[in-house]
Amino acid sequence: MNQTEARYAEYLAALERAGKIVGWDYEGLKLRLADKTFYTPDFLVIRASGVVELHEVKGHWEDDARVKIKVAAKQKPWFTFVAVKPGKRGEWDVERF
């Protein structure tokens, strides 16, 4: 886990303590996108509503990572895919796929 992911894990732990999420796991799921092509989201997050989200934490995006999350979101519509990056004043910028 890199430093940005560690900060996000602290954020998720706070959401869990506040009852906004039921739980989370770091790299707890691996998705097969194609033959010999896999995507492992950084965090699996279970919302209090029961919605399962897969969160990808990035400082900046490389083209291949953006393609993988878009392909995964199209192939696995039963998950909510969320990209997060550090924003201003300690907030997190969120992009949903």
Image: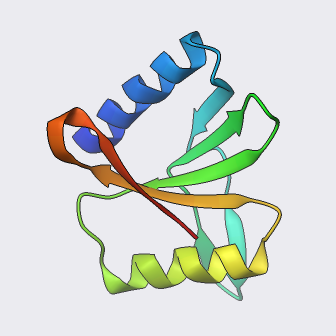
Q: Residue at x 50, y 50 (%)?
A: 42
* Residue that protrudes farthest toward the top in the picture: 17
Snapshot quadrant of residue 65: bottom left
Residue 2 visible: no
Q: Residue at x 23, y 38 (%)?
A: 3
Snapshot quadrant of residue 18: top right
In the foreground, 95 or 52: 95
In the foreground, 57 or 91: 91
**Can you say which quadrant of the picture contains the C terminus?**
bottom right
Snapshot quadrant of residue 36: bottom right
Residue 22 visible: yes
Q: Residue at x 22, y 34 (%)?
A: 90
Residue 22 in the image: above or below residue 49: above
**Can you say which quadrant of the picture contains the N terminus?**
top left
Colour scheme of the rendered structure: rainbow
Q: Position of residue 25 (x, y in %)?
A: 60, 35
Q: Residue at x 54, y 58 (%)?
A: 82
Q: Position of residue 91 (x, y in %)?
A: 28, 38
In the foreground, 21 or 37: 21
Residue 94 in the image: above or below residue 21: below
Q: Position of residue 7 (x, y in %)?
A: 30, 32
Q: How many marks?
A: 0
Residue 71 in the image: above or below residue 47: below
